[in-house]
Image (cartoon, rainbow, N blue to C red):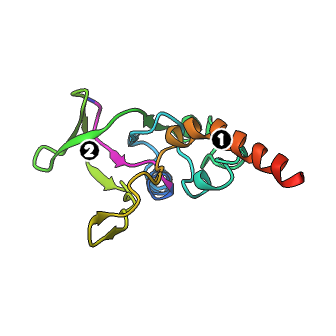
Amino acid sequence: MASAGLVVIGSGPAGVSAADAFRQHNPQLPVRIVTEDAAAPYFRPPLSKEYLRGDDSDINLHPADWFDDHSIAVTRNSTACDIDISAETVRDTDGVRYEYQWLVLTCGAGPTPASGAGGPVRPAVAQPRRRRQVARRRPTLRDRGRRRRRVHRL
């Protein structure tokens, strides 16, 4: 079990900012970010814009070595599934327990599908929340864009 300090669940801007602020005021205590994402912490809004179009620049919150330089551990591909407030521990789906003295939840929220009188509207509409979801769609969307441009030029 990891030693007590700060545990942040979620790796978006709020989680990374909380870890950074804590680190600045508590340089000796451990800081850990637990995230479901496989990728380094990144901005989500560009996923449906620049990143989807193939522009990878400026999506990461910090350069790859920033977390090591600031002694902030990032546990990727890990889903927090149990918080024991009395024992001050977080357990992930792999059974790993993280002790905490401070806990910050920055899990974010998923989109709420539009619904009508008959139930969800257009359930086939993609609502990507993770980098890997968008990465799978990028080649298909780029190919569609090329075809449109060719047809448009005729």
Q: Nearer the viewer, residue 24 or 32?
A: 32
Up-down relation of residue 47 to residue 97 (above or below): below
Residue at the far left in the pictured view: 86
Residue 29 appears in the rendering: yes
Q: Residue at x 36, y 48 (%)?
A: 8
Residue 56 appears in the rendering: no
Q: Which residue is denoted by mark 2 in the rendering?
A: 100
Badge 1 local density, few (<14 within 10 Å), some, or many (20+)?
Answer: few
Q: Nearer the viewer, residue 34 or 18?
A: 34
Q: Which residue is denoted by mark 1 in the rendering?
A: 63
Q: Is residue 21 left or right of residue 99?
A: right
Across and down, in percent, residue 94 comes to 25, 27
Range shown magenta: 2-12
Q: Residue at x 54, y 54 (%)?
A: 44
Distance from Cα at disc 1 to Cα at disc 2: 26 Å
> Please, what is the three-letter code of the amino acid marked with disc 1?
Pro
Q: Is residue 15 left or right of residue 99?
A: right
Q: Residue at x 24, y 32 (%)?
A: 93
User: Considering only order in the chain, which callout, 2 or 1, is on the residue closer to the N terminus?
Assistant: 1
Figure quadrant of the N terminus:
top left
- Residue 10 is covered by the magenta coloring: yes
Residue at the far front in the pictured view: 154
Across and down, in percent, residue 64 comes to 62, 36
Across and down, in percent, residue 121 comes to 37, 63
Q: Nearer the viewer, residue 130 or 139?
A: 139
> Please, what is the three-letter code of the amino acid marked with disc 2?
Tyr
Picture quadrant where residue 29 is located: top left
Q: Residue at x 48, y 49 (%)?
A: 128
Picture quadrant where residue 114 is located: bottom left
Q: Main secondary structure of the magenta part?
A: loop
- Residue 109 is covered by the magenta coloring: no
Up-down relation of residue 120 to residue 141 (above or below): below
